[in-house]
Amino acid sequence: MIRVALFGASGRMGRAVVQALSGESDIELVQAIETESRSGLDVGGIETISDGPELVLDADVCVDVSLAEAAMRHAKLAEAAGLPILIGATGFTDEQRAELDNLKVAQINAPNLSVGVNMLFEMAPLIRRILGPDYDVGLVDVHHKHKLDAPSGTAKKLAEGLNREGPDIQVVSLRVGEVVGEHKITFAVEGEQIELTHRAESRLAFARGVAPAVRFLADKQGGQYSMADVLGLTDGANRT
């Protein structure tokens, strides 16, 4: 049994992760962790505990779906405990990313845990490479109005991949209503248009990748990995 400590357990994404893991026979959520002000809440039958300095991690793998600033502290807690960590938070600065790169435990830093989106990360740059420079490329990133970062971490990663294959693409971010998440990439040339769209209809789409990522990390002692490694889209080599 793989025991999981979940940071950000009572948030929108945290509750989706709790729901997704509840159906896994080989994974058990043993610690649901939140800020002091949100400790004591019930999430899936587990009471949240504080992420304060008195926290003792008692798990095999950590999962973080909180916000960037809190996720930095949580990553350090995981490192101090010698536990691998899956980081699903977004909105990190370049300085924070560099700090995460230096963690001495195994980690996956994934702006999106959806299996479909991670397929898109791999497919979109390949399509641009094949189409060549004649095609204009644009990305529309749509999320609910409560989302703080724009563009989203997913949009940034999509753009990074596409930009490796040509000039920087156009990115438009919309924050409207309660949209869970939608990313549409358009490749356009005179007489033709190709669109790739991923539309999340619930946060379970994002949470569904957590279980395979936890299994992947459970026996890792160090190194940086990605969801592409988890899904078998790379050779899974240690990236330190």
Image: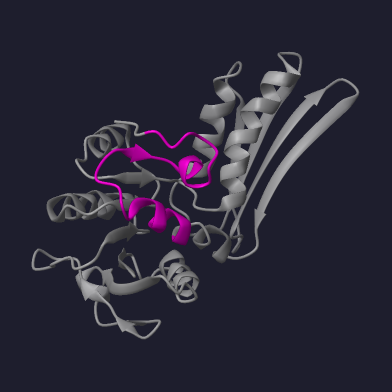
- Answer whether residue 219 is magenta in the image: yes
- The answer to whether any part of residue 11 appears in the image is yes
Q: Nearer the viewer, residue 184 or 233?
A: 233
Name which residue lies at 13% across and 67% down: 56
7, 94: nearer the viewer: 7
**Residue 110 sits above or below residue 60 on the image:** above
Percent position (x, y) of residue 161?
55, 28
In what quadrant of the picture does the C terminus appear?
top left
Q: Looking at the picture, tell me which residue is in the foreground, 223 or 15.
A: 223
Image quadrant in which the N terminus is located: bottom left
Q: Is residue 53 left or right of residue 103?
A: left
At horizontal 19% and vertical 66% (from top left) the residue drawn is 51
Rendered location of residue 221, percent (x, y): 24, 46
Residue 152 visible in the shown view: no
* Residue farthest to the left, as pictured: 54
Horizontally, is 237 left or right of 191 in the view? left
Of 78 and 152, nearer the camera is: 78
Query: Left of 196 or right of it: where is 161?
Result: left
Image coords of residue 73 (percent x, y): 20, 52
Q: Position of residue 175 (x, y in %)?
A: 56, 52
Scheme of colours in the image? one colour
Q: Magenta stretch: residue 165 in it?
A: no
Q: Residue furthest top?
A: 133
Residue at 60 percent of width and 65 percent of height: 202
Residue shown at 50% from the left, 62% from the top: 207
Locate residue 219 relative to residue 144 in the image: left or right: left
Q: Is residue 8 above or below residue 88?
A: below
Q: Which residues are magenta?
A: 211-237
Residue 59: quadrant of the picture: bottom left
Placement of 225 over or under 87, stated as above or below: above
Task: Tell me: residue 99, above or below residue 221.
Answer: above
Q: How many numbered circles does the render carry?
A: 0
